[in-house]
Image (cartoon, rainbow, N blue to C red):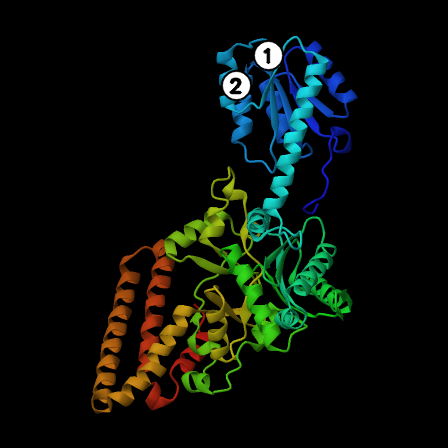
Amino acid sequence: MTPGTELPSGPQSTRSQVLVVDDDRLIRTLIREFLTREGYDVVTAENCRQALEVLEEEKHEFKFLVTDWELPDGSGIDLIRHVRHVVSSHYMYIVMATSHGNRENLTQALNAGADDFLAKPIDRGELVARMRSGQRILALETRLTHLANSDLLTGLPTRRVFEEMVGKEWSRARRYRLPLSCVIFDIDFFKRINDVHGHAAGDQVLREVGRIFANSVRKSDIICRYGGEEFCAILPETSSTQACIWAENLRKRIAESEIILDSAVVNVTSSFGVAEAMAEMEELEDLVQLSDQCLIDAKQKGRNQVVSFNNLQDSVSRDASGHLDYVFGGAVCSDAMTPVVSTVTPESSVIDISQFFLTYRIPSAPVVDHEGNLVGIVSEKDLMSVASRPNPHEITIAEVMRKNLICYPPNIPLSVVWEFLNRVSIRTVLITENGKTLGILSRQSILRWLANTTWKQNAGHDHASDGAHSSSKRLEAAAKLLAETSRQLTNDVEVRSEDEHAAMVIGTVSKMQDLMTDLLESVRGESGTGAMALGTAFNTVDF
């Protein structure tokens, strides 16, 4: 419906649903007969419990509620208050039917949320007249809601409505482990259309692109005009590959359309960014932001194309100035990653892995099959999502783990991952090779690598006189602490029980890894190995 569209004047054209609640079977039948003749779709209930059950059924979309004051298991006032407190997509017109017609009762019912009164015994003419009055109010409410929720130019949902709707879809996708993709696109060189043909022509282009967009989606898809010449779609139960196919078809449809303006006929092109919800994403904004980064990449590559997250991973680093090469040198991901110390299996129970996390003090772990191949990742948040269920010991990690992971090979330039993590809100990626998990690369681990290499070397140029002395002292301190930690581990193994060994060893080895990193980096300038040697060493050690 667009602004100015004439609204229906009677229930016959909309078949408005009415819920009638009364404990008197004769009155229920009488009201149903009166309203059915007027074209209403009537459902009846004899008490509050039945009414609430019917209201919760998704197949119903009641526009009216006609309720008695006195009900066997409560009152009409209680029912009205409940209805008014339930968040609904539309307004429900409520009529209180009762023989208690005094001023005090009338005031109480209206304060509870009733819109009108109907005196008993029921008069057909009065009932129909009050329903028609309610129909006019509902029609006005529908019109106002549409105006508030729709973009006036394109008729598409506004960004505010879009964000309200996608929040529910995001929760559903995370709860049931369903794929969810986001597509953002905008019109190429739209400013040029405004400059050459005028803003009225630009509005016409937006309307036509919005029409093509709206006609290209499913009922389950959530779309909006995101802002200016930018549009957005959330595609439930759709993978990135499927979303790219859909986006490419829409791109072609827009490019092939001739848009008739007052002074010319124009063709426009559009650029698309596509991303699928990944395991590392905590909020819906992360998905939208990643799609937007893909859109930026599409425009930088020349426009009129679809760029997905996979393309963004492959082409993120384009440093013409050579500055990144200077900062990162020839470093690759394995130089800065944190090696994986522990993994879990899909068959493990939620209770077992929860205890595992608490004992070893780790927040997450990769999930691998019996052959050691990476199949997912599980975190404390995933375990928390099912912790309150009555049978957590029967829930396996396979049911809660996240499978859509962001992975990089160990030999890819570190600058690529650094730039990617700078562009998106994702904090970590996995380093894998031949399906095996080698380590985790996070913003923190890259900063640590920079602190131990590039930044330290730069500081050494500024303080050449005492650089060797400082390096020697750092090396000596790290070596002493490593030796002390090793002695402590040996002592703990002797005095503690075997049940405590696993947690103790993992915690101590993690600390020793950090110390080894400091040791290797402190001699990086002299040996030329540094973090690369660290990566090689840990790839050959089985913890």
- Observer able to see residue 526: yes
- Residue at position x 28%, y 66% from top? 490
Q: Is 40 placed above or below 170 here? A: above
State the quadrant of the N terminus. top right
Q: Are marks 2 and 1 in contact (CB under 8 Å)?
A: yes
Which residue occupies 65% across, 40% down? Answer: 143
Give the x, y percent position of residue 162: 59, 51
Image quarter where the C terminus lies is bottom left
Q: Nearer the viewer, residue 458 or 509?
A: 458
Pick whichever, 236 or 438, lies toward us: 236
Q: Secondary structure at mark 1?
A: strand
* Number of the label disc, if any, that sits on residue 98: 1
Pointer 2 residue: 109
Q: Residue at x 73, y 59 (%)?
A: 212
Front residue (pair 293, 521): 293
Number of residues whose C-alpha sits closer than 10 Å to that of mark 1, classed few (under 14), some (14–19) or many (20 or more): many
For numbered disc 2, what is the local secondary structure? helix
Seen in the picture, residue 8 relative to 503 is either above or below; the reply is above
- Can residue 368 be seen? no
In the displayed structure image, the side of residue 26 where residue 463 appears, left or right: left
Q: CA distance from mark 2 to mark 1?
A: 11 Å
- Marker disc for residue 182: none
In this picture, residue 159 sits left or right of residue 354: right
Q: Position of residue 188 (x, y in %)?
A: 65, 71
Label 2 neighbour load within 10 Å: few <14, some 14-19, many 20+: many
Residue type marked 1: Thr
User: What residue type is disc 2 on?
Assistant: Ala
